[in-house]
Amino acid sequence: MKLLDNKIAIITGASRGIGKGIVRSFIDQGCSVAFTYSRNKEAAEDLLKEFSSKVKIKCYQSDASDFQSAQNLVEKVIDDFGNIDILVNNAGVTKDNLLMRMGEDDFNHVIKTNLNSVFNMTKAVQRTLLKQRSGSIIHMSSVVGVKGNAGQSNYAASKAAIIGFSKSIALELGSRNIRSNVIAPGFIETEMTSKLPEDVVQGWRDGIPLKRGGLPEDVANTCVFLASDLSNYITGQVLNVDGGMLT
């Protein structure tokens, strides 16, 4: 018996990085997965081919920051899979700059993509979860949303807001056995960080108590825990997956 047997999950923004790691871990634990991508169709199809023979998995091109697109996605997933048990709000972007150089468009784009998508997707699955009186909603924030970071005021604002949103949803939906929790990753080594100079990456590693960057699997394993029945009495919480950065 696997931890996510007979469960169905939607994972947004999952063609690469942390999202891709979550898809892999969920499938390894027996979950049927519907995942979304924004633009990278080739990466999404490669991930689909990797697992299509093992469990039910399907990818959808969808913009979670658009309210109607989120509604349409959930309707399609219910048609294709029959139900939804887990939502992982993972889609997100960065547009880093110091406040004095940050344009209004860059601020609004990050807020819309990172925060509106969480509202849109959570609202879209709410009716289904309420009807079955169970479910786990997992929102991807960041240590930057907990402590802030120079040059990332837009990103930090969006990720901090996700925490407040999740705690409110936990209070609203807890009586229906629907849980809402947040994961706040620290420095996770992905395709994006591999483009940084090695000395910069090593500097980050040296400042972490565990002396290494996190892997997508580290975040994904925490997602599995929060999605599974092992965390049945946990809601409204923020789990920092950061190697001790915020200690």
Image (cartoon, rainbow, N blue to C red):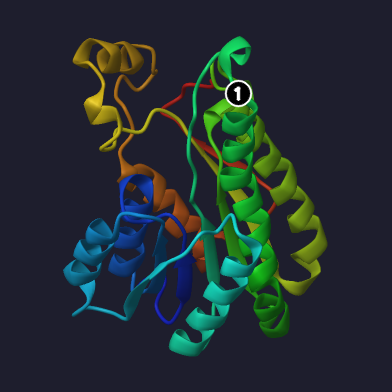
**Left or right, 118 with reference to 84:** right
- The quadrant of the image that shows the N terminus is bottom left
Is 107 drawn above or below residue 27 in the view shown?
above
What residue is pinned by disc 1?
Answer: 103
- What residue is rendered at 56% in x and 59% in y? 231
Q: Position of residue 232 (x, y in %)?
A: 61, 64
- Return the x and y of residue 181 as percentages of the image width and height: 62, 52
Closer to the camera, 13 or 162?
A: 13
Numbered circles on residues, count: 1
Q: Nearer the viewer, residue 234 or 24?
A: 24
Judge whether 121 appears above or below 98 on screen. Answer: below
As displayed, is residue 232 above or below residue 196? Answer: below
Q: Is residue 3 visible?
A: no
Depth check: give the residue in front, 188 or 44: 44
Left or right, 204 with respect to 112, comes to left
Question: What is the x, y in percent for residue 113?
Answer: 56, 46
Residue type marked 1 = Gly
Q: Where in the figure is residue 153, as x and y percent of width and height?
A: 62, 22
Q: Is residue 124 left or right of residue 94?
A: right
User: On the image, which quarter does residue 149 sit in?
Assistant: top right
Residue 36 visible somewhere in the drawing: yes
Residue drawn at (74%, 56%) of the image: 170
Q: Secondary structure at mark 1?
A: loop
